[in-house]
Amino acid sequence: MCYRNIILITILILLLAAPLFSSKKVEDFVLEDIDGNSVRLYDVLQETPVLLGFWASWCSPCMNELPVLHEIQTKFDTLLTVLCVNIDNPRSIPQAKSLVKSKRVSFITLFDTNSEVSKKFNIRSIPKTFIINQDAEIIYEHTGYRRGDEKELEKIILEMTSKKESLPNRKEEKALKDTLKIIPKVDSEVDITDDSK
Amino acid sequence: MRKSIILIVFIGVASNLLSQDFFNISGVNEIYYAYRSAEDSLKNFFSDEFGFRVTYNNLSLGGKYLAHLPKYDKFSSVEELSPQMISTKWDERYIEYRADGFSLLGGTFEEAFGNGIVLRAYKDKDFEVDTRLDGFSLNALYKRTQMKALYGAIPSEQDPSKNETVAGLDVTLDIIAPLRLGASMASLRNFNPVDNTYTHQDIFGGRIYVNRDRLDLTSEYGYTKEYHGKSREGNAIYAHLNTYFDKITISAAYKRYKDFNTRMNDLPTVNHSMEPLSDRVPPGKDEEGLMGEIRIIPDFSREFVINYSEAWNNDFSLQLSDIFCEMRYNFETFSLTGGYSAVEKLDKDWQIWEKEITPSLAVDFGYRDIPIMLRIEYQYFQEEHSKNKTSHYEPLLQIDISKNDLALSIIAEYSYQNLDDLFDNHVWLGAQLSLYRIHNTELHLFVGEEKGGKVCRNGICRYQSPFKGVRIEIANNF
C-alpha cells in the first residue's frame, strides 16, 4: 500500500513538474511543398526565423492574408522565411495549388493533408499565424486576419531581426563565407597577371 | 527516510534527463457552455475537451479526452437526454515514434492515400464525419519514394458493437523531375447487419502527378471489387488540370464514379460549392461531371475568377449545375469583394428541383485604425416539389469591428417570401464577442440566434450548427 502511494505521488509530482522542464521549442515537422519536395521546419530555421501561417482555400480572410504574407516575404527577403501551411482536404489540393501558383506568391506553400502539423500547433480556427525564432521558440501568435494586422507582424519581425542585426544571420553568414572563398581566387588571378607583367 | 531519498533521486534523474533532451508538452483545453433557448426543458449544455501531446526526443504520446454534460445530439429526442447524464470518453489516444524519414504510430490516426479516392480516414467535427482508424500506421520516406502502410479498425455504422477492419498500402514514386506516380490498395472488411456476416472489399488505385511551371496535372483511377454472394465491381476516374499563362490560369476537371461508394473514401465533388450530386444517393454510386475555371490576376490588388461545373448520373435523372464568380479589388485604404453563386439541382425520380442564388458584396476598410468589415448577401431560393413551386429570399447583413485583442461581430439574417410579408417574418440576430491572447487563451461569447453553415466572424471561419441562446467558448493552449 505504502509503495503504491509512493508511486502515485511520484507520478503526480512528475506530471506537475514536467511542464517546468518542458522545452518551449516547437516540434519539428516535414511537409511536402507545391512541387512535392519535402520541407523540414528545423532545416529552414537553420537559415532564418520562420513565419508560419495556416490557411485553406475556402477561408475568405485567409485569401485577404495571402497577399500580405507575400509582401512580408518580399520585404524581409533573406531575413525571414514564410511557410504557409494549407489545411484543405486532399480532394481540394489541386484547387489550392492553382490558387497559389496563379498568384505567383513568394512564400513556400506546404500541404498538411492529414492534419498532423495543425494538430501539433493546436489549430482550432484559421487563419493562424506564428513567428518562430531560430531557437525554434514561438515568439508571437495570432488568430484571424483583419486589415492592419500586418503592421503588428512587421513590428515583431523587425524587433526580432534587429536584435540579430549585430550578428549576420546564418544565411547571410553563408553568403559572406562564399564571397570570401571567391576573393582569394580573384586575388590569385591578379597576382598571376602581376607576375606576367 | 530511505523512500524519500529514492524519490528525490528519482525526480532528480528524471528532471535531468528531461532538461537535457528535447522534451515538450503541448495541448489545448476547450471549455464550452451553451444555454440553448429551445422549447424542451433541457437548456444547459456543458462540455470540456482536453487534448495533449508529450514528446520526448523521437517518441510522442498524446490523446484527447471528452466530457459532456449531457452530450448534445441533434438527432436524438429530448426525452433521451437528462441534465445529470454525463458522458466521458477518450476521443483519441496514440503513441508515435519518429525518426529521419520514418514514423510509426499506434492508436487513433488519420490518413489519406492520394486524392482520397482509395482511402481517407479522417474526422470532420463540423460535418459529423469520423472515419479515423484505431490501429497502426507506418510512413517511410527513402530518397524519392514514399511509402504508407496501415491496419486499423472502425466501429460499424449499422452496429457500433461490431468492428470493421481496413488494411492499406500506398507508394508514391518520383520518376523524373516533373512526373510522380502513385499506387494504392486497401482491403476492407465490412459488417453486413442483414445476415450478420462480414463482406470483403478490395480497392486498387493508380495516379499520376505532373508538376511543371506552366502546368499541373493530377489524375487518378480507382477500381473496387466487393465479394458478397455475387461480387460487385466499381470504378472511379478523376483528373484535374491547371495551366498557367502570364496573368491567366485555366483549370479543368473531370470525374466519373460508378459503384465506387465506400465508407472509407472521400471523393472529389468537382464543383466550387463542394455540393454532392444528390443528398439521397451516396457519392460515388453513379455520377459524372465536368468543371472549368478561369482565374485572371493582373496584379496582387485585383483578381477575377469564374467557375462553372455540371454533374449528372447515367440516365440524367440527377443533375447539378454550379456557377461561381468573384472579383477582388485591394486598394490602399480599402478592399472590395463581389461574388455571385448559383447552384441548381434536379432529381427527376423524386420530382425535386432546387435553385439557390447568392450575390454578395464585402467591404473591408479602416476607420481611425479600427478595421471594419461589412458584408451583404441576398440569397434567393427556389424549390419545386411535385409541381408545387415555392420561393423565398434570405438577406444577410454582417458587420465586424475589432480593436486590439477585442473583436465584435454582428450578423442579422432575415427570411421572406414576398414583399407583403416583409416585416412579418423571423429575424436571426446574433452577436459574438471575442477576446484573444490573454495567456494563450481565446474567449468567444455568442448571444442570439444563427442559421448555421460556414460562418466567418472577425476574420475566422468555422462551420456552425443552427443555434439559439448563449454560448461561451474558452480555449487555452499550453
Image (cartoon, coloured by chain):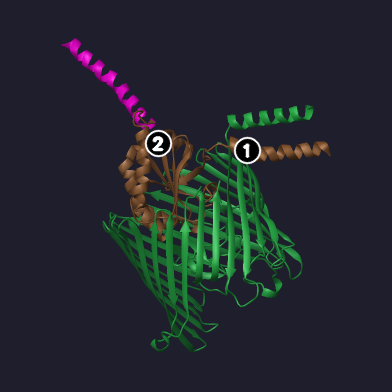
Chain colours: A brown, B green
Nearer the observer, B40 or B201: B40
Does dot 2 land on a helix, a strand or a loop? loop
Tell me the residue that label 1 is attached to: A18
Q: Quadrant of the N terminus of chain A?
A: top right
Secondary structure predominantly adopted by residues drawn in magenta: helix
Chain of residue at mark 1 = A
Query: Which residues make up the magenta segment?
Result: A170-197
Tell me the residue that label 2 is attached to: A48
> Which residue type does callout 1 highlight?
Ala
Tell me if label 2 and label 1 are in contact, CB under 8 Å. Answer: no
Chain of residue at mark 2 = A
Report x, y in % for residue B402. Answer: 39, 58
Q: Quadrant of residue A2?
A: top right
Report x, y in % for residue B3. Answer: 78, 30
Which residue is pictured at 52% across the width and 66% down the height? B464
Q: Is residue A168 above or below residue A87?
A: above
N-term mark: 2 or 1: 1
